[in-house]
Amino acid sequence: MVFLASLRQEDGQKKVKRFDIIEHTADVGITAYGANLKEAFANAAYAMFTLIADLENVREDVRRQIEVAAEDRESLLVSWLNELLYIFDVERTIFKRFEVTELGETSLKAEGYGELLDQSRHGLRGGLKAATYHMLKIEKNDGYSVRVIFDT
């Protein structure tokens, strides 16, 4: 089952779906979309945080630089999302906006915008343990799509 598709329109362009949520046995996954790969990676991070909490009340008080490296693009996607989960778990920072500033075959630099977690305002939905390699996919069509399954 796929639900919670997020649509947006920017600068008069056609509406682009940001992501779909995928139900998967005991786990959950997302397929994120973007006009380019940077946008697809940013939308994957946004989709992941929507699984964790209601982002409507998250302010952008904190700007955090994030850098990750991996062997290939698929591993880079998993490392990117797992780094964000680590920051959320350890530093208790929840993000709602992402700008991927550099994306190569094996490295990524980005900025995340959010704030320290406030459970009374952020409406936590559930926990994610990790992004996995199960069913992992990066695909180029009209734009890009990335699929990730998370351990819950």
Image: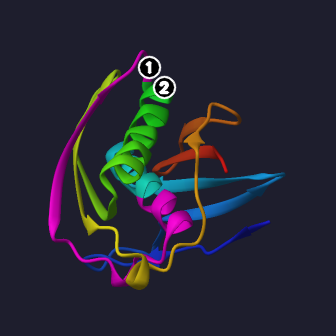
- For the residue carrying disc 2, how many other residues have a C-alpha within 10 Å: few (<14), some (14-19), or many (20+)? some
Q: Which residue is mark 1?
A: 72
Q: Is residue 51 magenta?
A: yes
Q: Judge whether 30 appears above or below 100 on screen.
A: below
Identify the image quadrant of the N terminus.
Answer: bottom right
Location of residue 102 by image quarter: top left
Q: Secondary structure at mark 1?
A: loop
The stretch of residues the image draws in magenta is: 46-72
Q: Secondary structure at mark 2?
A: helix
Determine which of the numbered discs, if any, sits on residue 90 in the image. Answer: none
Residue 105 point in image, percent of width and height: 35, 23
Q: Judge whether 149 appears above or below 93 on screen.
A: above
Residue 57 point in image, percent of width and height: 35, 84
Q: Are marks 1 and 2 in contact (CB under 8 Å)?
A: yes
Residue 96 point in image, percent of width and height: 33, 67
Location of residue 15 by image quarter: bottom left
Task: Give the residue displayed 70% in from the left and 58% down from the top.
Answer: 22
